[in-house]
Amino acid sequence: MHLCRSIVLFVVLTVAQTFCLHGATRSHYLVLSGNVNLGAPFASVDFISGPVEKVGKKNCHWWELSVPNEAGPLFRVRVLSANEPFDKQGAGEIERYQLQIPATGEVLEYREINSGKALLPAWDDFQRYFFPHPAIPGVAQTCSYLGQTLALQKTEPDQPWQPWSSVKILNLNREMLVGTSRPFKDTEGHRLPDKKEYTYTNFVAEDYRTMIDAGINLYTIEPYQEQWVRSEPVFYLRAAKGTPALQYPADLYRANYLGEMMFVDEPAIQTIYGVEPRKLAQNLTDVSGLIEQRTRTGYFSPAYYGIWHVEEELREQHVNFGDMRLAQTDYPVWETLIEAGYYEVKAGGNGLVHEGRYQLTKFDESVEKITGVKYKHNTAEVLQFYNALLRGAVRPFGKFWGTAIYGQCDPAIAPLAFDKAYDMGARYFWFWSSDHDHHLPWPEQLALARSLKEYAAQHPRRSIYLPAPKRDTVITIPNGYQLAFEDMSWIKALSDPKGKATGQYKNVLKRAFAAIQQCSARGEDYDITVDDGHRIEGYRRVIRIKEQ
């Protein structure tokens, strides 16, 4: 094996992209169950140590992982990485990532379109669980893999290695997730009046081709619809159960399968309209604290909307995870009351998406109601305010944000809402689909996706995965407060219009909106966040709104 590596290294140094066709070593492992109550999920695992390939000035290593079956491999994964996974430092940086699933005839390579780098599945601790690594550091005879123990049975040197042919490359854009929330569309094709319900029909293959061409790249699907998206340069979400059921572990290696959850649904709205909080909440901080706690409780759970929900569904199918945890963590909170978004993201939510029902007149009326001051806002100012709340909620935690267009949104504002969000660094560009007047008709979804696709092509932006740039101003409000448009007088401390707490709350709102108007008048790029003691940096100016 070492001699082959030396020969290959010499060849690679002289002729780029050359492979050692007969110098690979196959290691065959038997699987010992990591759970005393369940048998191993498969009998054996093969690992092939392949050739060296030069990437730039670095020598990288090809290797293959497969789970054999009587009818052939359940799947085969090929990786080009800085090291082999058995090395002390692990696989290191991944340059190429390929997946072969013989049962479907797919041979795919996943790449992130902005960087050109390999794109790995988004499961938490993917390399730790889905790549084998020595159970005892430095000793590859006993390994850990998918929560099970691998026992080395034999090694076979001088095995053939050929690059896979007919590999379909999927260039995926993880920085712009343009998505529709349901697996169906309306049949009317236009808006209906008076909250009348639409007639819905499930998407078919032709619909997905139309949506992909328009620029929609995130889909919530029924299991039978997977066949139309899984080999396309798009992301998809589906339940582990259903017909056909998710194939463990093969389907979890698909880098464009994100899990089941698209979002966590409105913890703030569900809290402030709950019977118990309205009866018992004494102070505004009770409500903000409860929103944070409920978000954390639901997010870190196996329940629906929880990060371990896919794992729970697979456990119900008797999948043996051993000591592994399958966590889907990369999904945001979808919320109307984004004024409470900071507390939701602080609780662990991976981001924040606004339910965009943007209308100028209603916005002006709401601001006047809570401040007592008449303001006349233009579209850009309204969008910047909402985006400043979103950005200010996620920036302290390094998370992502975006907006969703609803049927109640002014159609004249909707395209500008996407453009403005894109310019300000959004990741999520969504549509709500279902529920009478909340529903955005399918033709409007397509038109907005095409408009955003064209706008983004004409206005390239820096990666949202880079450190956030320095901005002009951040406006901070006291911990526990919200710049809420909702009536909060049901909270006991705010029930007295002339009470001290009510006066402090209204003064915070007035001073915050006065600062917002000042920033708008100066043409500043501002954020709005909560001053809970976290380090506030990355701004040229900090405006702190105090209770007194």
Image: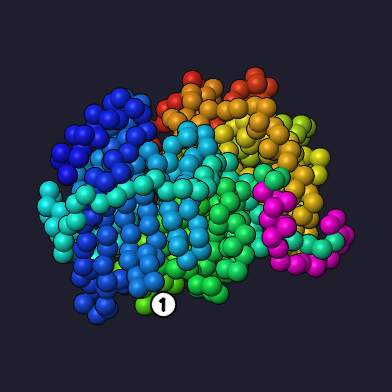
Q: Position of residue 60 (x, y in %)?
A: 29, 36
Residue 190 shown left or right of residue 427 in the figure: right
Q: Position of residue 57 (x, y in %)?
A: 31, 25
Q: Residue furthest bottom?
A: 37
Residue 339 shown left or right of residue 75 in the figure: right
Picture residue at 58% right of the left edge, 51% below the top: 232
Examine the structure image and report whether residue 32 is included in the region drawn in magenta. no
Q: Nearer the viewer, residue 113 or 543?
A: 113
Examine the structure image and report whether residue 210 is included in the region drawn in magenta. yes
Q: Position of residue 85 (x, y in %)?
A: 25, 47
Amino acid type indicated by mark 1: Gln
Q: Residue furthest right?
A: 193
Q: Is residue 428 above or below residue 240?
A: above
Residue 9 shown left or right of residue 344 in the figure: left
Q: Position of residue 387 (x, y in %)?
A: 61, 37
Q: Is residue 377 above or below residue 135?
A: above
Picture residue at 36% right of the left edge, 29% below the top: 16
Q: Nearer the viewer, residue 301 or 31?
A: 31
Kindly indicate the quadrant of the structure image that contains residue 506: top right
Element on which disc 1 rests: loop
Picture residue at 47% right of the left edge, 66% below the top: 103
Residue at image mark 1: 317
Picture residue at 62% right of the left edge, 59% below the top: 228
- Within 10 Å of disc 1 (Cα), the crowding (few <14, some 14-19, many 20+) is few
Magenta region, residue range: 189-212
Residue 364 shown left or right of residue 139 in the figure: right
Q: Nearer the viewer, residue 161 or 255?
A: 161
Is residue 272 in view? no
Kindly indicate the quadrant of the structure image that contains residue 141: bottom left
Kindly indicate the quadrant of the structure image that contains residue 421: top right
Q: Is residue 132 above or below residue 539?
A: below
